[in-house]
Amino acid sequence: MATPRVCVLRAPGTNCDYETAFAFEQSGAQADRVHLFRLLEDPKLLADYQVLCIPGGFSYGDDVGAGVVFATQLRHRLTEAIGNFLQRDTLTLGICNGFQVLLKAGILPGGSAGWSASTQTQPPATLTWNANGRYTDLWVNLKVASSKNVFLQGIDTLPCPIAHGEGRLVVSDPAILADWKTNGQIALQYVDSKTAQCDGELLPFPVNPNGSVANIAGLGDATGRVLGLMPHPERFLFATQHPQWTRLGLKGDGEGFKLFRNAVAYFG
């Protein structure tokens, strides 16, 4: 199996880069924590990597909105480097704040097909304040809604922790949801573990912890090589991290490892 190189791109305020790099390394990749400023100095560095991951945290303190400053740096100062990366046979992952960055930079929902040097005047979707108006930290249950996304191969359901204040996905036009479903871009949905319900009506808190449209927890591009999700799989690498691990008799690896192993296996 080939050993892919992973760029875990961090910025001032990022706080999940160590855990994310660890997850990739334990899955068989070579992961480098690369500061955004270094990439701004030498954008050609990105050509050395097969995976780009923007981890969770509070980049730039979320001072003007979650992920906004980080996203602006990518779109306006790394336009060519990001465009070239997306055109290659690469993978891109954004977790929590990283999902916010991918969406607000324009990498999602279109991936390479939607990447453009021009700023979109009206993006098709964004992530905004949770419906409850509060930072929310709890465990949720996820249902994989797309069979085409590389990161989600062989996964049906996934328990995961969330920790965010701006995780509610909203769309400019509800009609876009049908296009996303047709293209296999709705990657993950919050699911009621008792009823297995995730489609249809908006699920209540805490099943859907932020009020995201169509209960969407993760979004991909049409190729399946880009994924953004609000939950934190890097925080469930060991069974003992689950809050009910003793009651459920969980042992060994946590289920969050699957996403990172799928990324490495893609290059095998």
Image: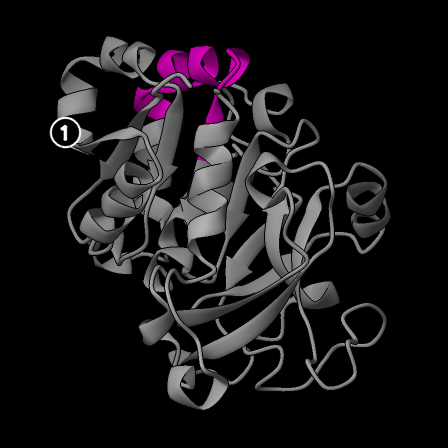
**Quarter residue 124 falls in:** top right
The amino acid marked with disc number 1 is Phe
Residue 187's x, y, as percent? Answer: 66, 49
Q: Confirm whether the magenta stretch covers residue 81.
A: yes
| Image position of 168 (left or right of 250) | right
Q: Which residues are magenta?
A: 76-92
Image quarter in which the N terminus is found: top left
Read off the residue under disc 1. Answer: 37
The foreground one among 181 and 170 is: 181
* In-front residue for pair 123/153: 153
Q: Position of residue 94 (x, y in %)?
A: 43, 44
Whole-percent x, y for residue 27 in the image:
35, 39
- Rendered view: 228 above or below 253: above
Left or right: residue 148 versus residue 64 is: right
Residue pictured at 48% horizontal, 20% vertical? 267
Q: Secondary structure at mark 1?
A: helix
Magenta stretch, main secondary structure class: helix
- Quarter of the image where one finds residue 4: top left
Is residue 149 visible in the rendered image? The answer is yes
Residue found at x 51% / y 38%: 262
Q: Is residue 63 visible?
A: no
